[in-house]
Image (tube, rainbow, N blue to C red):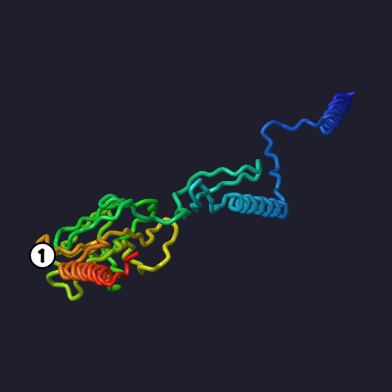
Amino acid sequence: MRYIPRLFVLCLLVLLGTVTTATPWQPHGEVLRRAEKDTTTTAAESATTGAAATTAATASKTDSKTDTASATDSTGTGTGTGTTTKSSTTGQTTSTSGSTGTSNTTYTGTGGISMLDPNEYSTTYYKIGNYVTFEWNYTSLSVTPSGVNVVASCSLNSHTYTISSNMSVSPTGKVVWDTKKYQANATVPLLTASYTLIIWDAAKGISATASAGHLAAASHSFAMYVPQPYTPLNGFICATCSFALSEIERLGLKFAFGMMAITIASFTWFAGDFGVFAT
């Protein structure tokens, strides 16, 4: 009978052991095993991430670029440099910065002069030996020359007289010619004749063709005369009068008319004596 309690205890231990093995519960504080990462999978993921970053950087560089912008205004064309950013998502182009470019302006017509003194609508006569003043304005001049030359050309002796060389340009041009000083030292003296005032760009030839907006050779006509010494009235000869006669010519006419009168009177007397006119 004393073996019955021992058998009971043994059966109880077996039963408890069976229940404990079938239960999924884990004791508190048990250290769990760390999951190991797959090195092959990690390397593939890193390569994919790097390729995506490179592609994004390349796309960013490609989408952001600098273009050359062209601008056109009412007077001409100009070019400038600006920075343009293009968005790959929206397709819009936005100018973020720029600088002023070089403008190539197109002009029409050439420049000239408008005479102020003397009047451009009349011919002025200047006495050689006095100061002669020429004054003018520039017209239709878009490109200012560095200097101009001013000369007077005489058609009578085909000579050109220099008045000013490489004269500075201002809105109103003016030059004073001392003809007395020039005449005193001139190898080719001034004559009583018509002259042409010529003004042109000193950087070009007098016969060069001017570009649009530049000064073309401009001209104006005037006349000059040499003063004559005093002449008494009876000895004065009018050079511009058609019927002007000298004293000798007047005496010759008087003699001719006198001889004509004597001839007519003599013929009348002779004819009367011989009865030519008798009836």
Q: Amino acid at mark 1?
A: Pro
Where, by quadrant of the figure, is residue 28 drawn? top right
Determine whether 12 is above or below 178 in the image. above
Q: Is residue 88 above or below residue 14?
A: below
In this rendering, the answer to whether 90 lies above or below 46 is above
Which residue is under mark 1? Answer: 229
Q: Nearer the viewer, residue 228 or 216?
A: 228
Residue at 19% from the left image edge and 72% from the top image edge: 189
Instruction: Please state which of residues 186 and 262 is positioned toward the viewer in this rendering.
Output: 262
The residue under the point 25% across, 55% down is 124
Q: Nearer the viewer, residue 254 or 33?
A: 254
In-image side of 226 versus 123 (left or right)? left
* Residue 204, image x, y percentages: 36, 67
Element under disc 1: loop
Q: Based on the displayed image, in which of its 4 quarters is residue 112 positioned? A: bottom left
From the top left corner, tell me how far across and down residue 91 is, in percent.
Answer: 65, 43
For the point 87% across and 25% down, the residue is 8
Res 218 → quadrant? bottom left
Estimate the x, y position of residue 255 in percent, counting from the top left. Answer: 18, 70
Locate the C terminus and report the quarter of the image it occupies.
Answer: bottom left
Marks counted in the figure total 1
